[in-house]
Image (cartoon, helix red, strand yellow):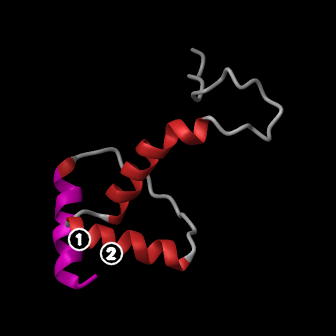
Amino acid sequence: MDSETNERRSGQDRRSGADRRKRSVYLPEEIQVQIEHEADRQKRTFSWILQQAWRIARPEIRKMPSINLHDESDDEPSEPSA
């Protein structure tokens, strides 16, 4: 990405006012390059592409068996009790 693209994207991020939580995600280089190319093609951020991919893939991922022994009925994180 060039600096102009980075500046444009960071301006979009500031204007959206969305809750932002920084995370480190380790991806194989090939996948990272593919996401970057798609983000450039759509003139979207890397993060936006990743979020859309998650939203699309989540129903399929939820069908996969868990390797944990916890109760799978807890699909969503629980709310802290008052």
Mark 1 lies on residue: 41
Q: The residue tagged with tag 2: helix, strand or loop? A: helix
Q: Residues within 10 Å of mark 1 (few under 14, many from 20)?
A: few
Q: How many marks?
A: 2
Residue depicted at 83% across the width and 32% down the height = 69
Residue depicted at 56% across the width and 22% down the height = 79
Left of 76 or right of it: where is 56?
Answer: left
Left of 45 or right of it: where is 5?
Answer: left
Return the residue found at the far right. Answer: 69
Return the residue found at the far top. Answer: 82
Which SS does the magenta portion mostly show? helix
Q: The residue tagged with tag 1: helix, strand or loop? A: helix
Please provide the residue range marked out in magenta. Answer: 1-15
Left of 8 or right of it: where is 35?
Answer: right
Position in image of residue 52 (x %, y %): 36, 49
Q: Is residue 9 above or below residue 14?
A: below
Taking the magenta stretch, the answer to whether it contains residue 75 is: no
- Quarter of the image where the C terminus is located: top right
Q: Is residue 18 above or below residue 50?
A: above
- Who is closer to the viewer here, 79 or 26? 26
Position in image of residue 49 (x %, y %): 35, 58
Residue depicted at 31% across the width and 68% down the height = 38
Q: Quadrant of residue 63?
A: top right
Q: Amino acid at mark 1?
A: Arg
Residue depicted at 20% across the width and 76% down the height = 5
The tag on residue 67 is none
- Who is closer to the viewer here, 71 or 37? 37
Q: Is residue 34 above or below residue 67?
A: below
Q: Amino acid at mark 2?
A: His
- Quarter of the image where the N terminus is located: bottom left
Is there a contact, CB below 8 Å, between mark 1 and mark 2? yes
Mark 2 lies on residue: 37
